[in-house]
Amino acid sequence: MHIPSSRISVSEIAKERGEDGASVSKSIGVEEKTVPNAGEDAFTLAYEAGKQAIDIAEVKPSQISALFVGSESHPYAVKPTSGMVAAALEVDPFCHCADLEFACKAGTAGVQIVDSMVRCKQIRYGLAIGSDTAQSRPGDALEYTAAAGAAALLLGPEQTKNALCRIDQTISFTTDTPDFWRASDEQYPSHGGRFTGEPGYFHHVRTTMQSVLETSKIALEDIDHVVLHMPNGKFPSRIAKEFKLTEEQMELGFIVPHIGNTYSACSLIGLVHVLQEAKKDQRILLISYGSGAGCDAFLCTMLRDGVKLPIDTRETTHLTYSQYQQQMAARAH
C-alpha cells in the first residue's frame, strides 16, 4: 500500500467555496484526502505498492509471472502502466501484463484474473494492483473526495510459506448504468449527481452482497470484517446500516475519512488495513464498486494472524487550497 504524504482538508476546500466546512465534512463523512505530489502518478504509486507486497511476501520478482494494474488515471493513453511497473520491479519479462479499467473496481478485477491464473496453475505468483490519482473538476462535488493511492496484492499457492489469506469465493455483478463517465478527450469526469447513489452504488452493492451470502450459505453475522468501496463515508455507512453490520465488522476497513476516495485502490487499501489486524480463521467480505457499473465480491479466510506493514516515516503535509492548486497544476505539466 502506498499513499501520498500530502493532504488537504474538506474544510479548506469548503472555505474556498464559501461553504461551511464542518457541515460538508459531516455530510459526506470525509475529513481530508490525499493529494499526489508533482512526481507521483499512477505508475509511481503502483510501483511503491508492488515493491512493498513483494518484500512482505519474500518472493523473488523473477518468480512473478503476471502483473495487472487497474486504474482510471493511467499516465499514458497508449503505453502500458503494467509493463512499466513490471520492468521497474525487475519482474521476469516472460510475464502476463495488462492495464485494466473499470472505474473504481479495476484493481479487484486484477485480483480475480490473477487468482484464476494461480488456481489453474498457469502461474505460481502474480501481482494485482489498484492505483489512481483521481481527477475532479474544480468546484465539482468530487473535489472533496477524489484522492490518490495504490494497493498491491501478491497472489500465489495457499501452501506458500508466507500465505496470509485465502480467497474462498468471488462473484461479480455488472450492468450498463451510466452514473459516471469521462470521454477520452476530456480532462475531468462527469457524473449523474444523485443518480450515482441509487441505482448506481446502492443497487449494485446491495445486490452483490445478497448474492454472495446466498451462494456461499454464510450468514452476515459470521463474517468478522466487511470492506466496501468508499466513494465517501456516507454511502458505505448507509449500506452498513441497511444490513445491520456492526461497528466492529466495519471498523478496520473503513479508511475513507482520512484519505478520501482513492478510486481503483480504495477497497484494496481497506482490505490491506484489515489484513494487518485480522486474526487466524477470521472471515473477510470485500465488495468493490465501479461506476458504469459493477461490483466484485470476495469471501476470504485468514490463514494466520495479520502482518503489520512497515511504518511510513514520511512527514504528512497539510496543504492550503492555493498550495493544492499549485501542486495539481505542476502534475498536469
Image: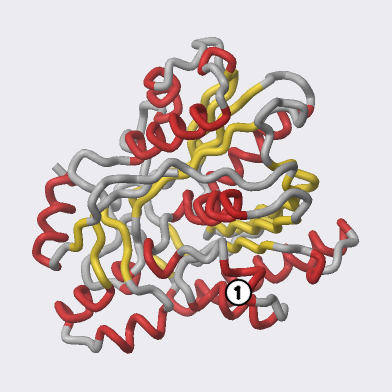
**What is the count of numbered marks?**
1
Q: Position of residue 41 (x, y in %)?
A: 29, 40
Q: Position of residue 136 (x, y in %)?
A: 30, 61
Residue appearing at x 26%, y 50% in the figure: 36
Instruction: Give the amino acid type for the residue marked by disc 1 in the picture.
Output: Pro
Residue lying at 39% horizontally and 73% vertically, measured from the top left: 30
- 320 or 18: nearer the viewer: 320
Relative to 189, is 236 on the left or the right? Answer: right
Taking 14 as reference, is 61 above or below it?
Answer: above
Dot 1 lies on which element? helix
Asked if residue 146 lies left or right of residue 324, the reply is right
* Residue in the foreground of this view, choosing between 91 and 214: 91
Horizontally, residue 34 falls left or right of residue 104, namely left
Task: Measuring from the top left, give residue 129's x and y in whole percent.
Answer: 50, 38
* Residue plotted at (51% across, 76% down): 195
Q: Which residue is mark 1?
A: 199
Front residue of 90/208: it is 90
Quarter in which the C terminus is drawn: top left
- Give the x, y percent position of residue 287: 64, 58
Query: Residue at 65% of width from left, 30% of height from top?
Result: 162
